[in-house]
Amino acid sequence: MKVQKISDHIWSLGIWVVIPVHIWLVEEEDGFTLVDAGIPMMAKGIGKAIQEIGAGLKPLKQVLLTHGHSDHVGAILKLREAHPDVPVYVHRLELPHMEGRQPYPGRKKAAASLPPGLAQPLPESADGSLLPVSGLTPYHTPGHAPGHVAYYHEADRVLLAGDLFTSRRGRLHRPMPMFTADMSEAFRSGAIIRELRPERLEVCHGASVIHPADHWDDYARAMKAKYNV
C-alpha cells in the first residue's frame, strides 16, 4: 500500500486492485481519524501506517465514512479487532442501506456491508446540519449514495470527497455511473467545490485534483452534454 503525505495533517493510503482505491488518515495531536476504510486487504497497511506516522504514540480515534458501499468499509471489521472501542460514523441516511434493511437506490436487493449497530450517525445540530468532527467539516453530498458525505479540512484546505467525483489526468471526472444512484443529484452536490474552493480534492478512485473549482466549468459542460443535468 502506498502511503503519501498530501498536506500538513493528512495522509493518503492507496492501493490498486483493478482500479485505484484511496482512503485518508487525518493526524491530530491526540490521535488519528480514518476517513473511509477501503477494502479488507488494506487493514494491515492501515494499522502499520498509524504506528509509523504516529511513532506508536497516537491511537486511532474514530472512523468517518463518506458512505457505506463495500469498497469504503472493507477494513473496518479487522480494524475493530485491534481497536474494539473505536467508533464508526456515517450519515444517518446510509444506515438502512449499509445494514441491509433497504436496497440502495437502483439496486434490486438489499445487502449489508457492515453488521447492524456497528456504525452510528454523524452528529447533527437541531436543524439537521452535520457538526464538525475533529477538524473536519462534513457536508452532505447525496447522489452517488443517499447519505454520501464529503469532509473538508479547512486548515489544510483539502476536501476528502469519496465518490463524489473520480478523476482523470488530474481533472474532475464523473462518479462511476454503474454505482451512482442519481447522477443529476451527484452533479448538484459536486458544486460544493465552488463554495469551498479547496486547494486540493481527494477522491477514492483517481488521483488528486489541484484547485478543482478551476475545472468546474469544463466538468459542468461535459456532464450537461452527457446527462443533461
Image (spheres, helix red, strand yellow):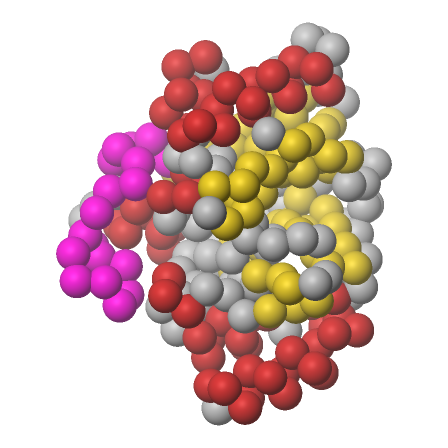
Q: Which residues are magenta?
A: 102-119
- Judging depth in this view, the residue of 176 and 189 nearest the camera is 176
At x 72%, y 47%, the residue is 153
Question: Would you say the magenta stretch is mainly helix, strand or loop?
Answer: loop
Could you tell whether 170 is left or right of 144 in the image?
Answer: right
Task: State left or right for residue 34 relative to residue 42.
Answer: right
- Please identify the quarter of the rendering in which residue 113 is found: top left
- Residue 193 to residue 219: above or below: above
Residue 219 is left or right of residue 79, and the answer is: right
Q: Which image quarter: residue 181?
A: bottom left
Residue found farthest to the top = 56
Q: Where does residue 161 sit, x and y in percent of width and height?
A: 60, 55
Quadrant assignment for the N terminus: top right
Is residue 134 in view?
Answer: no
Q: Nearer the viewer, residue 1 or 148?
A: 1
Q: Is residue 102 visible?
A: yes
Q: What residue is shown at x 72% (from left), y 29% (from top)?
A: 27
In the displayed image of the protein, which residue is found farthest to the front? 18
Q: In the image, what residue occupies the spot 50% across and 65% down?
A: 175
Residue 116 is covered by the magenta coloring: yes
Give the vertical position of 124 relative to 216 (above or below): above
Query: Residue 105: x percent and y percent?
Result: 28, 65
Q: Position of residue 59 (x, y in %)?
A: 62, 16
Residue at image coords 23%, 63%: 107
The count of marks equals 0
75 in magenta: no
Q: Quadrant of residue 2?
A: top right
Q: Residue furthest left?
A: 109
